[in-house]
Amino acid sequence: MDYLITAYDYFRPGGWIMVLLVLISIWMWSLIFERLARFRNLEKSDVDRDEAVRLVSRKGCGESSEGVCHPVIRRFLAARTGNSELDRRLLDYHAMRQRPQLSRFLATIAILAATAPLLGLLGTVTGMVTTFDVISLFGTGNAKALSGGISKALVTTQSGLLVGIPGLFMSRLLTRRAQALERRLTEIIIVLKQVV
């Protein structure tokens, strides 16, 4: 219970900006955890190059495995025509349909991570405006009155950076993992085009 009281005392000076920062943080981290789990499942349950060639050669996918390449192969085998040129284009088409699934939510994560420090800066500006309003009314002699605006400025800045910096780091990490999965998909599609 003391933890909640301490958290409330920390967030209270920031006002409505802290509410926005908390909501952005929850939204961003839920998307990050979803992407981490999704990429882990895609990497864990995917087929390698030799397995992909074997699946296309025997014209059957067997069990319904998920991964980056397996759904592409499954859709390709369902639509396969027997015409080599058309089949190569079908492979490209199904790979193209799979690629947006890899970059899903990555732009949203990056935008949320970049927005958090800007909200912190907004809190800094509003806190300093509050401080200057107090100075204009009471002068600089009342330190307790000045501390409210300064506290708002510092708490929101700190919170915006605490949300934004790890978010940007995770955004870059997830983008690199998505690019690695795309490269893997491209490599397997190139190999399969030679087999088809």
Image (cartoon, helix red, strand yellow):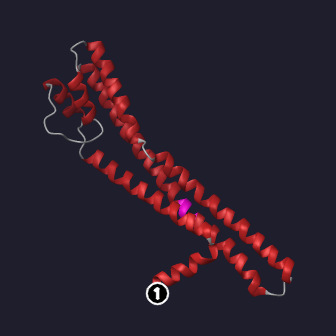
Residue 162 lies in the magenta-colored region: yes
- Location of mark 1 (residue): 2
Q: In x, y percent, where is residue 176?
A: 44, 45
> Can residue 28 be seen in the rendering of this structure?
yes
Viewer-side residue, 58 vs 100: 100
Say above or below: 111 vs 192: below
Say above or below: 175 vs 184: below
Left or right: 172 as drawn, with respect to 156: left
Viewer-side residue, 66 vs 18: 18
Amino acid type at image mark 1:
Asp
Q: In x, y percent, where is residue 50?
A: 20, 32
Left or right: 52 as drawn, with respect to 8: left
Q: Quadrant of residue 127?
A: bottom right
Give the prevailing secondary structure in the magenta stretch: helix
**Residue occupying image coordinates x 52% and y 50%:** 110
Q: Quadrant of residue 157?
A: bottom right
**Residue occupying image coordinates x 51% and y 63%:** 23
Q: In x, y percent, where is residue 72?
A: 28, 31
Say above or below: 112 vs 132: above
Label 1 secondary element: helix
Viewer-side residue, 130 vs 72: 130
Q: In x, y percent, where is residue 131?
A: 77, 75
**Residue occupying image coordinates x 85% and y 83%:** 138
Residue 155 lies in the magenta-colored region: no
> Can residue 162 be seen in the rendering of this structure?
no
Where are the magenta residues, as a range?
A: 161-165
**Residue occupying image coordinates x 52% and y 83%:** 6
